[in-house]
Amino acid sequence: MSVGHIWYTRWSPDRRKAASDPGVEALGAFARRPVSLLLRYIARHGLSHALILFSIVAAVGCALASQYAVKSLIDSLGVGRSHPWLVERAFIVLVVLIFADNLFWRMGGWIAARAFVAVTGDIREDLFAYLVGHAPTYFADKQPGMLSSRVSATANAVYTAENTVAWNALPPCLAVVGAIGIVASVDPLMAAALVAVSLALATALFWFAHRGSAVHQTFATRAASVDGELVDVIGNMATVRAFGATWREHRRFDAYIELETTSRRRSLLYLERLRLMHAVVTAMLSAGLLGWVLWLWSDERATTGDVVLVSSLGFTILHGTRDLAVSLVDITQHVARLSEAVRTILAPRGLQEAADAVALQAEQPGIEFDDVTFAYPGRRPILDGFSLRIKAGERVGMIGPSGTGKTTVLALLQRFYEPQRGSIRIGSQDISKMTLNSLQDALAVVPQDVSLFHRSLLENLRYGQPDATEEQVHMAALHASCADLIASMPEGFDTIVGDRGAKLSGGQRQRIAIARAILKSAPILLLDEATSSLDSASESAIQAALERLMQGRTVLAIAHRVSTLQNFDRIVVVHRGRVIDEGSPAELASRPGMYHDVIAGQMQRATPRRRTEGDVIARRRAGRQPGMVERLGERNDI
């Protein structure tokens, strides 16, 4: 079974978890409360965790009772020859406790193997759902590798923290408390002294552990930045090679590694200082405890079994508090990593779905931009009072110089950003009041820079319509003139296209994107230089496919090649964030203006080449030698 099939089975449209799910939205409140976030997911599997807790308490109780059973066995040996049943009873109790101890540990481990994994799966799914709901500006400021490492780091920190608490922190904590209780049966004053020392030691450990949180968080941040840099360089390896920057990137990465290892070293040494402090205190405590019970024995206030019991309990307390201290400082480090990761991922969203959002209703919707002003953070407005009305089923093309806001218009329509002023409507509905799913379902987009997933061609084609039949996929590929491309691939539709479609050329990726849009069959079609990466022959075929695709749909297209807009109903000219001219292609071509200038410029660029060829032929017929420029032109044509 393929990953794609598993995805569709679990997350088909009626079961998918939206990024705007109220449960996912609520995660933002836990950005600075990592422990509360962990408890939230533990509560989802409350019964399993309750059974794990019971098994741990029972196992520790059996272990402590075993030591008391050893005391009873030793004390019964003194009269065992005359009362052998006392020895037999003590032996049976000890054996039963040993078996029960191991049984409860295995029961807890069996349940934890499912519960702990379920918690990490839940938190990873929800963090991903929250992450993808961020506005594009959030991702523009952060490296993809850093974000992906934080999602994984969060899940790993949660899993490690749960395991550490369950198997390394809770058992010694219970053992110390139980051991002190048993010591109280020998001498209450001794138990009281143990309680006082243990509380003082625990308080000191927590204080020092909290004081070192900043050190651990610094390490977590720098570890994430190393992952981000690594992914960034690998993702741009072609550029690195092209500029001969391999050694430069190697030195840059070494600098990041040095910062990360320095932070890791500081974090580990801080933990070692805590462990050293604890080791000194517990060693002195164990020695004092053993001396105390020997003094009681010499004064005939303790039996031989009591000496053995207190000695074994002393070692239990020694090892238990040591293990507890190690576990607590480890948990502190994991919580610091969890805190740093969730603080980044669960940052407030810059763009959210309105609480009263409703689904888009219009089947044949028009589009209206009303006095829209928009500026990217820290920059001047790229759209300033932009207004445009597109009727349902109308085809409108946009032209204008680079940087005038054409692509921004498409981004705003997809609600990647929120305008600072004005409104955008589809039909009669403001898109800020629509559910994001209904808005996205109404739009099919063919971008200029096509990015494909590192998946099969079939999965990429079906991305906008996961339940499309094979026949529908084949027809979409045929209409987009990429059927021959797919047939030439070694595994056909199952061919993996590589990271971002690296195994395909720019034109091939663009044809796949067009087929994907054809297959989605949305009522609104957005084209951003949809044929920019195609040769003339392919462009003609794609134009015919686009013509079929645009039938009965509202179309908004950006194009620099005016030939792609000749069959459009209207062309708008955008300059400095506003519409400065509009009309049919024939109207704009017949009057002075930017569209007329673009046509003239493209014709002029095509004319000199033909004129140069004619001149070369004429000069040859006249017996003249072509000049240097003409020879270069001739050589290029050849």
Image: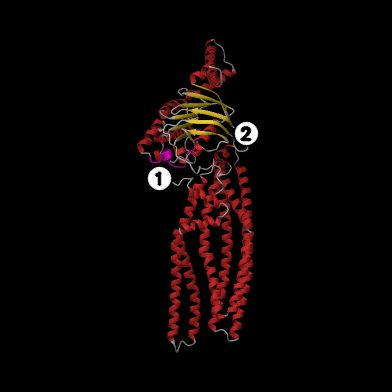
Q: Across the whole image, how many numbered discs are drawn on residues?
A: 2
Q: Which residues are magenta?
A: 447-467
Magenta highlight on residue 450: yes
In the rendered image, residue 605, in percent from the top left (x then y), is placed at 55, 20
Numbered tag placed on residue 330 in the rendering? none
Task: For the residues labelled 2 and 1, say whether their Cβ atoms are less than 8 Å apart.
Answer: no
Secondary-structure class at tag 2: loop
Q: What residue is pinned by disc 1?
A: 14
- What's the residue at 55%, 12% (across, down)? 619
In the rendered image, residue 53, in percent from the top left (x then y), is placed at 48, 65
Q: Farthest residue to the left: give it.
A: 471
Q: What residue is pinned by disc 2?
A: 380
- What's the residue at 44%, 25% (across, down)? 540
Please determine whether, in this image, residue 224 is positioned above or below residue 361. Answer: below
Q: Considering the whole magenta stretch, tell me its main secondary structure.
A: loop
Give left or right: position of 37 versus 93.
right
In the image, 146 versus 349, the foreground residue is 349
Q: CA distance from mark 2 to mark 1?
A: 42 Å
Magenta highlight on residue 327: no
Disc 2 marks a residue whose amino acid type is Arg
Secondary-structure class at tag 1: loop
Disc 1 marks a residue whose amino acid type is Asp
In the rendered image, residue 121, in percent from the top left (x then y), is placed at 47, 53
